[in-house]
Amino acid sequence: AQSVSQHNHHVILSEAASLELGCNYSYGGTVNLFWYVQYPGQHLQLLLKYFSGDPLVKGIKGFEAEFIKSKFSFNLRKPSVQWSDTAEYFCAVNDFNDYKLSFGAGTTVTVRA
Amino acid sequence: NAGVMQNPRHLVRRRGQEARLRCSPMKGHSHVYWYRQLPEEGLKFMVYLQKENIIDESGMPKERFSAEFPKEGPSILRIQQVVRGDSAAYFCASSGVEGGQGPYEQYFGPGTRLTVT
């Protein structure tokens, strides 16, 4: 199974700042890539996903992620965060044709008003 | 819009007791996955079930843990004789696509936070 690294454990930002969260997985091949978000007290929600095609993926709430195969990376970005983006963000990967998702440890994002 | 339901949301057990965690998949989904999140770690796959079948339990601890998904009713993750190390968040996910046959999406429940005292 893949090993997934998220570079930042906790990120603190002010509103309107830009956000970038790093995610790397351990080995190549065809993979499916996901970012999930968990708002306080809520369940994990899918923010965006990459299966194939354009490596720049747009998700909900203004988030996007770029798949760079040569770097085994799938970094999440948002140009201007809001207080409501305070949440925990998880990167997840599975090998194509494998149902088991491997998750990173998560990044807690705190946006200060 | 009934998503994946898990109950209880919080469960406190003393060492040696049994914990039963329940998961109802999204309507129309027949594939259930259980994941465990230990403190400061990401979610780790435990088991994949379809109705009345365990498909893959490679992530389950060999002892004390069991899972089922009966024909009727929710999926149950059962932990016997709990120990402090079992304290974690347990997440259930469901999907409507045959597992292992191409891209799919797993929809997650809110999790059950088990605390063993």
Image (cartoon, rainbow, N blue to C red):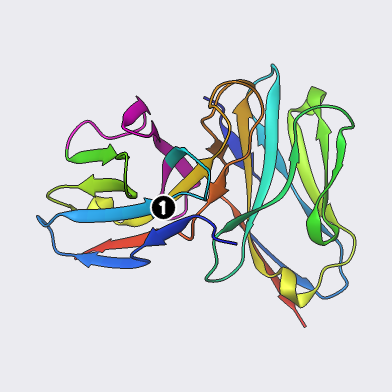
- Residue B56 appears in the figure: no
Label 1: chain letter: B
Q: Residue at x 18, y 52 (%)?
A: B83
Q: Is residue B10 left or right of residue A55?
A: left
Q: Residue at x 49, y 46 (%)?
A: B93
Task: Tell me which amino acid carries mark 1.
Answer: Ser
Towards the viewer: A54 or A25: A54
The magenta region covers B34-63
* Residue placed under numbered mark 1 in the picture: B24
Q: Is residue A49 left or right of residue B116?
A: right
Q: Is residue B16 magenta?
A: no
- Residue B103 appears in the figure: yes
Residue A91, position as x, y percentages in the image: 64, 44
Q: Residue at x 75, y 30 (%)?
A: A51
Helix, strand or loop status at disc 1: strand
Q: Residue at x 78, y 48 (%)?
A: A76
Most extreme residue toward the top is A29
Towards the viewer: A29 or B9: B9
Residue B79, position as x, y percentages in the image: 21, 47
Which part of the image, by quadrant, shows the N terminus of chain B? Answer: bottom right
Which part of the image, by quadrant, shows the C terminus of chain B? Answer: bottom left
Residue A75, position as x, y percentages in the image: 77, 43
Q: How many residues crowd around disc 1 within 10 Å: few (fewer than 14), some, or many (20 or more)? A: many
Towards the viewer: A70 or B74: B74
Query: On screen, A97 above or below B78?
Result: above
Residue A38 picture quarter: bottom right
Towards the viewer: A36 or B23: B23
Q: Is residue B60 magenta?
A: yes
Residue B98, position as x, y percentages in the image: 55, 27
